[in-house]
Amino acid sequence: MTAKRLSITVIFTGLVLGFLAVLAVAILREAPESNSYALLADAFLHGRFDVSRCFDEDCARFGDKYFVVFPPLPAVIAMPFVAIFGVEFHYFMLLSMIALAATAYLWWRIGQKLVETRELNSLLVLLVVFATPIFFVTLRGDKIWFFAQSWGFLFASAAIYAALIQKRALLTGLFIGLAFLCRQMSILYLPFLYVLLLDDDTPLFRIDGAALKRGLSLAAFPLLFLAGYLAYNAARFGAPLETGYKYLFPRELDPDPNDPGFIKNRLRELGSFSTQYLPFNVLYMFVQGPHLEFVGKYKTEFGAFDNNGASLFLVTPALLFAFLARWNRAFWFGLITCAAILGVTLFYHSNGFSQYSAQRYALDWLPILLVFMCAGWRKEYTAPLSLLIAYSMTVTLAMIAIGGMLAS
């Protein structure tokens, strides 16, 4: 082993151990009654959709009842554990860690097809697990929003694996349907996944028996889950298309009515979506770097870490290799899907707050970009990619560790 290779191995080993130490501390510190999915799971076990109380402020009030508005599948995942341990169940981070481990395995298998060497495949797994926002949402799995994202990312990755590696339309549809029940915009993956299911020499717009079977198999589970989700909305809020987000943050749950925070002010005064959010969201997605504020007379004291996060592409520049992939039909369908999901969130009242990492809403479309990033890697890029990924892991670990310490 050369000195350079030994050095980078030591660096990666130290970084991975640092991440695992942070995760271990977080798991040991997870407190009961912090994830409202425990309440929703308990409600399902008792044949209800409403919850008796909330563990956080992200509940909705409709009539005289409270509801968890987020998609229901993460509560179903937690149901066996809540059935055993009750609503005090507080091992959501362990469940998120299981999702992270499964995600790592899937991307190892995807990398076996897309990248040229075992070294590049190892770098891919390190990037996915430790240099994207997925580690941060795993670390915060004790909260409802992050727990849903960890499982949504897993199921979206599984859908890509089933389409790209196994070429199984029904299984692909099942996984993207499960992702939809964690993160609603995952439903927009369907056209891209259809293209991934095709062989390179299969015309996109050929209508024959094979195409009809493929399309119906892909859409079967998503349509079933969509119908179930619409019925779930109607049962809760009286209308299939009413998700309940406009009923979020009832004022009686405000811990400080005089200072509700900018997210609540946005929702209550500007709405869930507004063009006024665009500059903030665009700059944080593409321009804003990790920002630690210094305070005091001499600006020498640590203040606070910016908990609106940092640009995904500044934290993880290796993702830009996606644009070195072949610009074929899969690339364009994937890019359009990423742009559609991203475009919606750029007008959303929250960019993923709170986060000591890159923009976590990027996880909704990041699996697609990862496919083309892998396709853009070459064996001769191994050395510079090692440096870029070590940099990304260092920045991510520093943001998480410093941000967490300053917030505690």
Image (cartoon, rainbow, N blue to C red):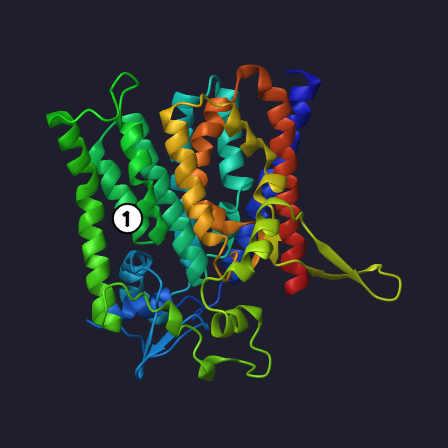
Picture residue at 31% right of the left edge, 26% below the top: 165
Residue 114: percent from left, percent from top: 42, 22
Provide the secondary structure element on which disc 1 rests.
helix
Q: Please determine whether, in this image, residue 74 is positioned above or below residue 197.
A: below
Seen at 65% across and 21% down, the residue is: 5
Which residue is the extreme one toward the front? 275
* Snapshot quadrant of residue 201: top left
Image: 327 above or below 355: above
The N terminus: image quadrant: top right
- Please give the name of the residue rendered at 48% of the width and 46% of the height, measured from the top-left corner: 362
Up the image or down, 214 lies above or below 59; here it is: above
Is residue 214 found left or right of 2 in the rendered image? Answer: left
The one nearer the camera, 45 or 158, is 158
Q: Which residue is mark 1?
A: 178
Task: Place residue 182 in its image quadrant.
Answer: bottom left
The foreground one among 399 and 271 is: 271
Count of numbered circles in the view: 1
Where does residue 219 sit, x and y in percent of width and height?
A: 20, 41
Q: Between residue 97 and residue 109, name the one nearer to us.
A: 109
Neighbour class for label 1 at 10 Å: few (<14), some, many (≥20)?
many
Q: Nearer the viewer, residue 13 or 394?
A: 394
**Residue 265, horizontal then vertical, whole percent:** 54, 73
Residue at 26%, 25% in the rendered image? 204
Q: Percent position (x, y) of residue 228?
A: 19, 58
The residue at the far right in this view is: 298
Q: Amino acid at mark 1?
A: Leu
Residue 376 visible within the image? yes
Depicted 240 relative to depicted 399: above or below: below
- Figure quadrant of residue 154: top left
Residue 12 in sight here? no
